[in-house]
Image (spheres, grey):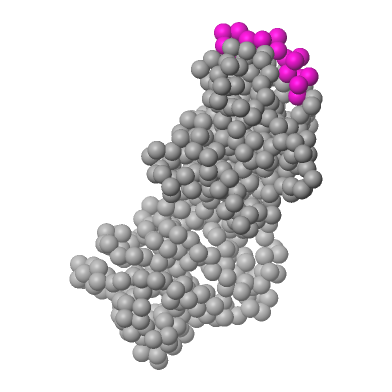
Amino acid sequence: MLVLRSTEMAAVDKEAIELGYPEIILMETAGRSVAREIDTLDELDNQSDIYFLIGGGNNGGDGLVAARYLKEWGYKNLKVFLLKPGENLSGINRDNYNICRLQDVEMEVIDSEKLNEFRKILNNADIIIDGLLGTGITGDARGLAADLIGIVNDISVNVLAIDIPSGLSLDFKSETVIRADLTVTLADLKIAQAVYPGRYYCGEIIIADIGMPAKAYRKIRPDYFMLSNQEAARFLPYRTETGHKGTFGKVLIIGGSAGMAGSVSLAGEAALKMGAGMVTIALPAAIEHDVNSHSREIITEALPDENGKISLKALDKIINISNKMDLVILGPGLGQGKEIAELVENLLKKLKPPIILDADGINTVRDLEQLDKSQKKILLTPHPGEMARLYDTTIPEILENRFDYIKDFVEKTGQAIILKGADSLIGLSEGEIFINPTGNDGMATAGSGDVLAGIAGGLVAQGLDLEKAGIVASFIHGRAGDLAAEDKNRYSLVAGDLIVYLAEAINSIIK
């Protein structure tokens, strides 16, 4: 699905109107969609106290339309509180204000001198409908709107936001933002809603279809997307009934070191659980027994080692093994050091299959030229610390400018990347960025990244290209974490739980 920036959303609205879709019809459809969502809430009935907070922008107009419909549908105790007098509204907002008056919708202008009294009024609501500020805001909320946002956040009342929580700007510069329990966003998801901290303020998000014509999107070229459940199902590789382990692909994992046998085991088990036909782990001879003792279905290839790490002497053997494989995962638990860096540099040059470069494989990269697309296809899977090391900068700098760093990486290398985090970003070679909607903080645990690399490897082995595999693997990985958290809790998750819930996560997509 599309994730739009403020300029893109404005361009779509403008194009729709120019195509002959009247603005008043857009608002009517949007307001009715909001009213319909309110009407379906189980905790409300026609006796519920529903209070609308209405500003002077278009989402305030959407709120006036929603109030009209609820009044028509028999809701008896709804009330509209206006940020400014209705006579001062303009255009179609003024028209909808006048229609509300004709329908005897109870309306009142908020008195900035009596905010303590107003707080008590709002505290009696069953739900507050937030239509104060829309997507046009830049910077932080100010004045009476900011005061009202503070009051709403300070009381214990459910909040439904129209389109976007008031104060949440699409340029990520806002700090004074309503915390909604539910956001009914109109037409398309907005970028600030898709990533943190904006996702935190939105609560559950419902995307309301307001009948925006397809032609309205023809003049924009969106860069941001988010995978839906239906799209994830379409991306999954096809499995033929007559397939065998060769059909479903062979994955080679190169990694492991003394004390880090679990990394390659987790990646290997995840690849198998995702559907790969066969998984081989090339690892230091010193840890082969450790891996074999708890990974029964995985084949191991013992390599010459030195101080518990793969020796550079193993290079030719690794190349020979890799020539029979469909994909290589390079890096889990590999360790660091001068010889490991030299080994990885040689492997990046000489390996023929596509590569998922993970963990210590990333940490050995000297500069982005080593990852140039002209040599082979690589999918990088760094967490912010590894990305910071790659760019010789700080983790806060990466987190503050994630989209910029992903775009820079893709432009310079032509490769795909998963920048892991609370809302992982997947950058594709043509410049598109997918924002992953699944996952939770319980997954912030050692080994979780190894599982992700294995899931992606299993998908590539079955025929999915690296870029689609990165998108789908992130989605399934997060879904497995969400299912595990539901059954257990977010404190107690470990990486192995993600593998346990992987089958259930796939079932939730293909059901």
Residue depicted at x 76% and y 48%: 241
Residue depicted at x 60% and y 21%: 292
| 129 vs 262, nearest the viewer | 262
| 37 vs 308, nearest the viewer | 308
Quarter the C terminus occupies: bottom right
Q: Position of residue 288 (x, y in %)?
A: 60, 17
Quarter of the image where one finds residue 353: top right
Residue 247 located within the stretch drawn in magenta: no
Q: Is residue 212 above or below residue 280?
A: below
Q: Is residue 33 left or right of residue 231?
A: left
Q: Is residue 181 above or below residue 249?
A: below
Q: Position of residue 401 (x, y in %)?
A: 52, 41
| 290 vs 23, nearest the viewer | 290
User: Which residues, given as a range, are shown in magenta?
Assistant: 304-322
| 328 vs 392, nearest the viewer | 328
Q: Position of residue 392 (x, y in %)?
A: 55, 26
The reply to whether residue 229 is visible in this rendering is yes
Residue depicted at x 43% and y 42%: 441
Q: Is residue 439 above or below residue 299?
A: below
The reply to whether residue 225 is visible in this rendering is no
Residue depicted at x 70% and y 9%: 313
Q: Is residue 391 above or below residue 211?
A: above
- Farthest-out residue, bottom: 102
Quarter of the image where one finds residue 453: top right
